[in-house]
Image (cartoon, coloured by chain):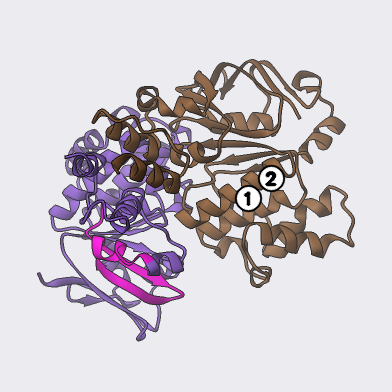
Chain colours: A purple, B brown
Amino acid sequence: MKDYFKYRYTTDIEFNLSLKTHVAIIGNSGDFFLDTLINNNDKCNIFIGDKEYTPENKFYIRKLMSFVLYKHLNIFVGETVRDEIVFGLESLAFTKNEINERVNSLSRRFKLDNLLEKDPNSLGSSDKVKMKILSSLIIKPNVLVLDNVLCELDYVDKLLIFDILKEYTDNEGVVINITNDMEETLEASRIIIIHDNKLACDGKTISVLNEEKLLKRLGLGMPFIVELNKYLMDYGIINKYYLTNEKLVGALWK
Amino acid sequence: MEIIFDKVSFVINKNTPLEKTILNTISFSITESGIYSFIGASNSGKTAIGDLISLLYKPTRGSIKIGGYKNSRLKKKDINNLKSKIGYVFKNPYSMFINDTVSKEISYAIDNFGYKKESKEKRILESLKLVELDESYLEKNPFDLNITDAKKLALACILIYNPKIIILDEITNGLSVSDKNKLIRLFRMLKNKYRKTIILLSKDTSFCYQITDYVYLLSYTRLIDYGTKDLLENTNIIKNANLEPPKIVSFVNAYNKKGRNLDYYNNILDLIKGVYRDVF
């Protein structure tokens, strides 16, 4: 598939992402990567579609790329959840009918429809994250950047959001999830490790998680189920990865 | 230091349209040092418990007794005395910071709690070492740190004045597996060597399962269950409270469905040994 998102920082970091990709960015330089995405940088070339991210077309690029940041979780622009959600659409001068239609359908999908008239400050952390993701997705961006926010979600909400993100990527979207929680990487189709402002590893999820020595050296660890598989493979009990408890137990006790 | 909650209720914005009950007749008592986990989904009232123990708010009803002081009879002098014995790391570490460099931030408590100036440098370096940060951070701006380092710095800021009670709100969010393992070692040392009372407010049941001595389960403003960490092995209760059961417990439950009898282990290495012995 044709590459949609291209990122290049001097000769140290270079990768391309096609549409319908969910990528997890891990490593200690997630913050640096995010900073270059938000503010751009002289040494950095970012292409979205055919357009390059330059100071001149910043506003055009911002329409294509939405951010949900940990640092901004407690910063609100509206008095109610509805105000918060429609802010992006109102800024882009959508009609009232269209705004209502999108808010109603998406708030039901995010299970926020009974909180629309509440004060955002009174929400729990999980609802705040859902609200922020909803207000980013409502303008239908092509690239969604998440910075360490999914760890705040409750169990059921986490399953719901991963479901929504999957739907979004299947619908020609790109999700870039900057995270430290290795369990979240299992939901991604690709993992990129950026360590000390350099690209350390890039590949499909399971092939990167297979690099045990690298992950340990960089202090990242592995998801529980992968680590368990790894040890069992070392003991010669199983010979390939089983990524759910049921499949793994099924392989152990045939 | 003992912490006793007696029928505590906490309501915010009382008598306004924004009135909201945060805690509903909660009673518990913590009398010994150890690691205590308050687990619950968001909106369950975890953060309010931290706020009340650290004397940021007064309860609407009920009484709180901390280290011999009763909340209703506290004087300003008592509050100052108690605050130096309680360390509270907020959920969002950036909302804790008030200075423009890490060195000012970290020494803020010892400057204000009347500690000796001579030992300041030593204390700063020691507390940074405990959370695995180095001297190169001292001149950085705390607001520029990434989430992992900010969490570590927030922890260092309270460890520096050696409080007896340490309250940690969602400390594991945004930390990698190896950082969590380092925290486990640090908390075990604080508990065993220095007899601290550590209160974890968290929804990360996998982390709590590895270290906690006692668990309090909160759901929708109420304390629904408490007990030793065996409580976390009851997946129905945990799932009903909108929490994810610990990973090890989920695996062992799936394993035992095959008619086996595998024990619940604390960490993955012991679990592997158990599986290996069982399979061969």
Q: Which residue is mark 2?
A: B190
Check disc 1 and report its element: helix, strand or loop: helix
Give the extent of the magenta segment: A187-212
> Could you tell me the amino acid type at mark 2?
Leu
Residue A250 in sight in this render: yes
Q: CA distance from mark 1 to mark 2?
A: 6 Å
Residue A46 in sight in this render: no
Left or right of residue B116, residue B127 in this image: left
Q: Which residue is mark 1?
A: B186
The quarter holding residue A240 reads bottom left
The quarter holding residue B261 reads top left
Query: If the image is split into quadrants, where does the N terminus of chain B sit?
Result: top right
Q: Position of residue B36 (x, y in %)?
A: 60, 32
Q: Position of residue A147 (x, y in %)?
A: 39, 56
Q: What is the number of callouts on the image? A: 2
Is B239 one of the magenta-colored residues? Answer: no
